Image (cartoon, helix red, strand yellow):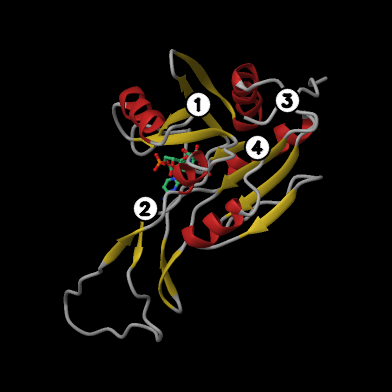
Amino acid sequence: LRPRDFDGVAVTITAGPTREALDPVRFLSNHSSGKMGFALAAAARARGARVRLVAGPVALDTPVGIERIDVESAEQMLESVLAGPGDLFIGCAAVADYRPGLPAAEKIKKQEARITLELERNPDILAAVAGLAQRPFAVGFAAETQDLVVNARNKLRNKHLDLIAANLVGERAEGRGFNSDYNALHVIWEGGDDALPLMRKSELAHRLLDRVRARMPNGEKV
Ligand code: PMT
């Protein structure tokens, strides 16, 4: 039996990819399936939390007892998150860092052999939440293809997070990370860290929540 150690805690979680429109029929996106974020939502709910799950386009069923808000772009995700960032925010979504500057109103026609895409920086959802005056306990993820711990520690500091969960993605991360049912995480906070080995995302979610609970002020807003 799981502890109900998140009883009364409002948790907002982002999951899945974002889609950034190029024209009415095309978009830029990535390989996130939403599995890690949905596992966290189910685990937090099982431990008594009230969960808002802000999801990019994914093909997953909503875990029982969870409020799910579907969005497409990073800008829509930011707006939905800021409408209720909760007491604990976990940014698990693979948010596109850039979007096409001006999406075409009509389908782009095939023309020259080479065309150029102009991209604009998207807002950083996690940094925006961590910068709120009434900030929740802010947990980020770091998806890295190399130098996992060093890069994640930089993100922890630059985005002013309370904790970050780093995972390997790409060619060196077979059987884990994007779209797998399994993952491994290196959990890092100011002054400490903990390596969680490869396991099912459903179990890993609980192990990550154990670390979060231990570092969060007890049931209080921070
Ligand atoms: O969805 P799955 O298939 O289960 O895969 C899980 C996962 C690999 C997507 C997940 O475990 C993961 O690593 N999620 C974060 C992916 C990511 O975008 O990482 P990043 O290192 O680029 O971003 C760092 C952090 O900033 C993340 O918490 C991200 O949500 C956040 N971010 C990034 C850009 C942006 N514009 N806004 C953000 O909030």
Mark nearest the camera among 1 and 2 is 1
Q: Badge 1, how many Cα within 10 Å: few under 14, some, many 20+? A: many
Q: Dot 1 corresponds to which residue? A: 163
At numbered mark 1, what does the secondary structure look like: helix, strand or loop?
A: strand
**Label 2 beta carbon within 8 A of ligand 1:** yes
Q: Badge 4, how many Cα within 10 Å: few under 14, some, many 20+? A: many
At numbered mark 2, what does the secondary structure look like: helix, strand or loop?
A: loop
Q: Dot 2 corresponds to which residue? A: 97
Q: Dot 4 corresponds to which residue? A: 39
Judge whether 66 appears above or below 87 on screen.
below
| Residue displayed at 65% across by 37% down | 39
Q: Position of residue 210 (x, y in %)?
A: 64, 20
Q: What residue type is labelled 4?
A: Ala
The first of marks 2 and 4 along the sequence is 4
| Residue displayed at 66% across by 49% down | 84
The first of marks 1 and 2 along the sequence is 2
Mark nearest the camera among 3 and 2 is 3
Mark nearest the camera among 4 and 3 is 3
Q: Distance between the residues labelled 1 and 2?
A: 21 Å
Residue 219: which disc? 3
Q: Position of residue 64 (x, y in %)?
A: 80, 45
Q: Check the image and name the residue furthest to the left.
A: 113
**Label 3 beta carbon within 8 A of ligand 1:** no
Q: What residue type is labelled 1?
A: Leu
Q: How far apart are marks 1 and 3 (CA)?
A: 17 Å
Q: Distance between the residues labelled 1 and 4?
A: 18 Å
